[in-house]
Image (cartoon, rainbow, N blue to C red):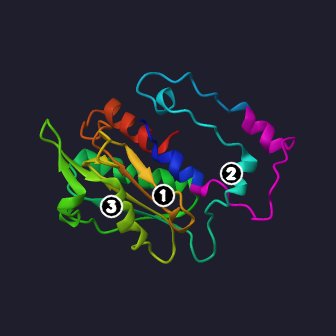
Amino acid sequence: MRISFSIFLIAALLSCTSRNEKKLDRTSTDIIKLRQNDVALEKPQPGDWLFEHTEKGQNYETYIAYDPVRPSATRNKIYLLPIGKFDEAQKKVIQYTADYLKIFFGLSVSLLPGADDTAIPSHARRMREDNHEQFKSTYILTYLKNHIPKDGIVVMAITATDLYPADDWNFVFGSSCYESACRRIFDISLFRRSAHNTKLPAMSRALNQDIIP
C-alpha cells in the first residue's frame, strides 16, 4: 500500500503542453533521451500495492485522454497545507518537499498557515489498538475541495498523524480524488515515513517517499 505523493502530483502536473497535443512523437530526440533514463518497475514485493492489486497501467495516450490538470495563466501555484503538530524533523521534510516541488515543476510553491488537528471532527478520526490516532483521509479531501485557492493548481494536506480511507482499511500513506471536479487535491501522512528521525538516512528516506516515484 505504498501510495507515493509523487504518483498523485505527477499525474496532475506532468504535462504542461497545449491541450491540442494528443499524440506523442516517440521518435523525437527529447523522447529518445528520456527513454534512456526510464527504469522499469521492479517485481512487486509483499507489502507493495501492486503485489496485492492488479492494475492495467497507463500509457501516454490514455493519460492525455484523461485530460490531466495543467498550469494556466491564472492557476499556477502549488499549495501545501500542514495539519496538526510536527516536530522539527518533520517540519524540515515539509520544507524540503516544497523546495523540491518548486524546482521539479517550475511552479511557485506556498505553505498555507497550518490547521490545528481539532479541524478533524470526531467522526473522521479513530484510535488504533496500539493507542495511536488516525485521521480519515477522505474527510480531509472533502475539506480541501472547498478550500482550493483561486490561483492553486494543486493543494496538498500534510499531516504527521496516521491516515485511513475507510473503516475496513488499516491505514493509507496518502490519497487523492480522481473525479473531474476535484483532481487537484491530495493528502499524505508522514506517520509511516521515518520523518521524525533527524538522522540523515532516515530523513532522506522520508523525503524520497514524498517526492520521488
Q: Residue at x 68, y 33 (%)?
A: 37
- The residue where tag 1 is placed is 177
Residue 81 falls in image quadrant: bottom left
Q: Residue furthest right?
A: 27
Q: Residue type at mark 2: give it.
A: Tyr
Majority SS type along the magenta span: loop
As drawn, the label of residue 139 is 3
Residue nearest the observer in this picture, 143 or 112: 143
Which segment did they paint magenta? 12-35
Mark 1 Cα shell of 10 Å, populated few (<14), some (14-19), many (≥20): some
From the top left corner, tell me how far across and down residue 147 is, in percent. 39, 73
Q: In this view, does 93 lie to the left or right of 77?
A: left
Measured in 3D between alpha carbons, the distance from the residue under mark 1 to the one under mark 2, in whole angstroms, is 16 Å
Q: Which residue is drawn at 32% across and 41% down?
A: 169
Mark 3: secondary structure: helix
Q: Which of 212 and 174 is in front in this view?
A: 174
Instruction: Return the residue nearer the eye: 135 or 4.
Output: 135
Q: Where is residue 43 in the image (x, y as percent from the top left)?
A: 56, 21
Residue for badge 2: 63
Q: Are marks 2 and 3 in contact (CB under 8 Å)?
A: no
Q: In this view, does 202 lie to the left or right of 211?
A: left
Mark earlier in primary sequence (1, 2): 2
Residue type at mark 3 is Tyr
